[in-house]
Amino acid sequence: HVIDTKALLKKVRKIEIKTRRLSDHVFGGEYHSTFKGRGMTFSEVRQYQFGDDVRAIDWNVTARYNEPFVKVFEEERELTLMLVVDVSGSEAFGTRSQFKREILTEIAATLAFSALQNNDKVGLLLFSDQVELFIPPKKGRSHILRIIRELLEFEPQSLKTNISNALEFLSGILKKKAIVFMLSDFMDQGYEKTLRIAAKKHDLTGIRVFDPVEVKLPNLGIVPLRDAETGAVQWISTFSKKIRKNYETQYRQHVSAYEELFSKNGAGKLSCSVEESYVKKLLGYFKARM
């Protein structure tokens, strides 16, 4: 196990170097303008100094003291970024499940470092059909490294998915508005109501990460298909066009339900195949929102 830890730390470090570079060069400013916007709060007044913006003069105070005073603004206090990540069985599905997990981790880490750069707190919620792990929002590099470590090696208790459950837990613990990124394949249903509530309160974005292999069942003859969520094995004939078609239809239904629900409730959404560049996808998403 000692070697495992060493290998894991090496992996964490590799992800840190890669995602930190991304967040510094690419996402820092974008993340900032997307979520911070023009959130200025008034903090105090001080005497006018040469070069101050005339528009910042506080006329009431100026009239009272017979000399010019200006309002000082500061950007609104830090925000909280909450990463809500699906660790259920279906997330491990695909030809390169380890690879998929690393992509999920890299996306989450990039967002986390972008938040860190903006002096925001970052929290993590891992879920299956239950809340598997909750790390309360905090600042700092070591905190983010812990998040990366959990994302890479956490073993869930359950293999099922319940998005509604995760959103409900979130609403219970986050008192103030937060930036919430939910990373999942969204192979679930019945989460309309909790999504509506969460999207009203928070700045919510769904990131669907998928493996192209999941979209279509290949024609491989008679194969044992293990249900990733129940663990039950069923022998099915992938020769059968009907079975392949059914599978595809069901898959597409989940995807379009996800897209529709997020759009309808004013939440952001993006889908990223493990073969695509998530950097391009995230950048495009941030730019479109500005």
Image (cartoon, rainbow, N blue to C red):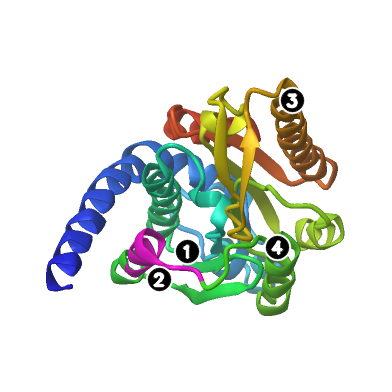
- Tag 4: amino acid: Asn
Q: CA distance from mark 1 to mark 4?
A: 28 Å
**Magenta residues (range):** 146-156
Q: Where in the figure is residue 142, as x and y percent of width and height?
A: 29, 70
Task: Report if residue 184 lies within the magenta region.
Answer: no
The answer to whether marks 4 and 2 mark residues whose Cβ atoms lie closer than 8 Å is: no
Q: Which residue is mark 3?
A: 245
Between circles 4 and 2, the one closer to the viewer is 4
Q: Quadrant of the C terminus?
A: top right
Q: Secondary structure at mark 4?
A: loop
Q: Earlier in the sequence, mark 2 or mark 1?
A: 1
Q: Residue at x 34, y 69 (%)?
A: 146
Q: Is residue 102 visible?
A: yes
Do the CB atoms of the residues marked 2 and 1 lie less than 8 Å apart?
Answer: yes
Dot 4 corresponds to which residue?
Answer: 162
The span from disc 2 to disc 1 (Cα, nearest Å) is 7 Å
- Is residue 33 positioned above or below 277 on the image? below
The amino acid type of the residue labelled 2 equals Lys
Residue at horizontal 64 percent and vertical 62 percent from the top: 160
Q: CB atoms at circles 1 and 3 under 8 Å apart?
A: no
The disc label shown at residue 188, or none: none
The residue wearing badge 2 is 139
Give the mark nearest the N terminus, 1 or 4: 1
Question: What amino acid type is highlighted by mark number 1?
Answer: Asp
Image marks 2 and 3: residues in contact by CB distance under 8 Å: no
Q: Circle 1 — which element?
A: loop
Task: Tell me if 194 is positioned left or right of 90 in this view.
Answer: right
Marks 4/2: CA–CA distance: 28 Å
How far apart are the alpha carbons under marks 4 and 3?
A: 25 Å
| Callout in the foreground (1, 4) | 4
- Left or right placement of residue 246 versus residue 215 in this view: right
